[in-house]
Amino acid sequence: MRSIIWLVLLCVVAVVAATTLGSNDGLVTIYWAGWRTELSLNLFLILLLGSVALLFSAAQALRSLLTLPERANEWRTLRRERAAQAALREALSEYFSARYSRAHKAALKALTLREDSPQLQVDGEFGVLAQLLAAGSLHRLQDRPRRDAVMQAMFQPGARRAAGHGIEDGARLLAAEWALDDRDAERAGELLDQLPAGVARRTQALRLKLQASRLQRRPLQALHTARLLAKHQGFTASAARGLLRSLAGEAIDETHDLQQLHRLWEQFDAADRHDAAVAARAALRAVALGSPAAARAWLRPFWERLGELERDDRDAVALALFDAAPGIEHEWLPRLEIALAGHGHEAAVVVAVGMALADRQLWGKARKLLEQSAGAAGLPLRARRRAWRALAQMAREGGDEARALDCERAAAALE
C-alpha cells in the first residue's frame, strides 16, 4: 500500500513538473572573471536543489562523525540499562520460582549495573525494588544478618528521598512481616508505628498489627485491631466473630482481680459487651475471682432475653450461671421459672436452674432437674460431675447415705 502511494505521488510530481517547467524558456546567465555561462532556468533550478541536498548530506555526515563518541557512549549506557532491567526481571522471576539463591545473585547484579547507569542512579524505585528482592531472598534463605544490613541501608535518609513514599511504605510492611516471622514482635511494632496514618489503616497493616499484638500478649489491643479488620471485611463474618470472642476471652483471662475485670469490661466496645459469649466468659472469670454476685450481674441482661439468643450463646450463658449459682438471690426465681418453661428441653438451662434451686434449698424440684442433667450426654463433664455431687449433698441432708455414696461413685466415674 505504501509503494502505491509513493508511486502516485511520483506521478503527480512528474505531471506538475512537466506542466510547469515544460514551457519555461527562461535563461540564467552567470558572469565570473570574464567568463559567461548561460543555463536554462530548469537546469539551474535542478543544479541548485542538488547542491543544497549535497551540502545538507555532507553536514549530516560531518555531524554524525563528530557525535560518534557521544552516541557510542549512549549506546553503551542503554545496553547497561537494559541489562540491569533484565537482571531485575530475572531476580523477580527467580524469587517467585522459589530459587532464592539465584534471585539474590540477580538482584545484586541489577544493583551493580545500576551504579554504571546514570539513568538508573536517579531512579530510586529501581534500587529499592532490587534491594527488596535481595533482602527477601536472604530472608527465605534464613540469612538474617545480611537481610537486616540490606534493609538498614534501604531506610537511610538518602535512600528514602530517592524512593517514593509508596514503595518506602511497602518496604516497611514487608520488613514488619519478616520481623513477625522471626517472632520479633517489638521490631514489627516499631516498623508499623512508623507508617503514615493512611497506610496504617490498610488491611495488610492491620493484619500485621494484629499478629504483633497477639505475639506480645496484648489481647485488648489485638481486639481493637481485629474489630477494625472486621469493619474492613478482612475476615468472613463467622471467622471475625470467633476471633473477636477469642481475643476478648484472652483479655478477660489475664485479669487478676475484680476491679481490673470491671475496668477491662468498660474498655470493651459496645458490640463486645452485648455479646452473650463474652459476657459468659467474664462471668466465669468473676466466679474464679470469688465474686459470683458480679458474675450474675453480667448475666442478668442476657438471661432476661434468653429466648432471643442463639443456642450456643444460650448454653454459654446457662453454664456460666451454673457456676455463679452459689448465693443466688431470691429475685432470680421468676427468671428461672420462665427460662425453664421456655427451654426445659435444653440440658444447659436445666442444670443451671437445678443448681440455682439447690442453692436456694428448693431440693424437691432441684433434685429432679439435677438427676435429669446428670445423665445428659450433651453436657460438659464438669457440669455433670457437679450435678452428681449436688445430688450427693442433698441425699446426705436427707439422711440417705447409701444414695449419697451412689452419687459420689457416679461423679467419680466421669473423671
Image: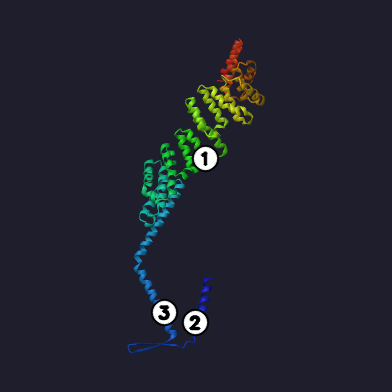
Residue 175 position, x and y percent, is 42, 43
**What element does badge 2 sit on?**
helix
Three-letter code for the amino acid on which mark 1 is drawn? Leu
Disc 2: CA contacts within 10 A as few (<14), some (14-19) or many (>=20): few
For the point 40% across and 44% down, the residue is 138
For the point 48% across and 84% down, the residue is 21
Q: Earlier in the sequence, mark 3 or mark 2?
A: 2
Residue 415 position, x and y percent, is 55, 20
- Of residues 105 and 163, the one nearer the viewer is 163
Q: Which residue is mark 3?
A: 50
**What element does badge 3 sit on?**
helix
Q: Which residue is mark 2?
A: 17
Using residue 127 as the reference point, say whether residue 320 is left or right of it: right
Q: Are marks 3 and 1 in contact (CB under 8 Å)?
A: no
Q: In the image, is residue 28 above or below residue 175? A: below
Q: In the image, is residue 279 above or below residue 407? A: below
CA gap, disc 3 and disc 1: 77 Å
The image shows a total of numbered marks equal to: 3
Residue 2 position, x and y percent, is 52, 71
Q: Which residue is mark 1?
A: 229
Is any part of residue 125 visible from this angle?
Answer: yes
Q: In the image, is residue 25 above or below residue 175? A: below
- Of residues 86 and 184, the one nearer the viewer is 184
User: Is the N terminus in the top left, top right, bottom left or bottom right quadrant?
Assistant: bottom right
Is any part of residue 99 visible from this angle?
Answer: no
Examine the image and state in which quarter residue 316 appears.
top right
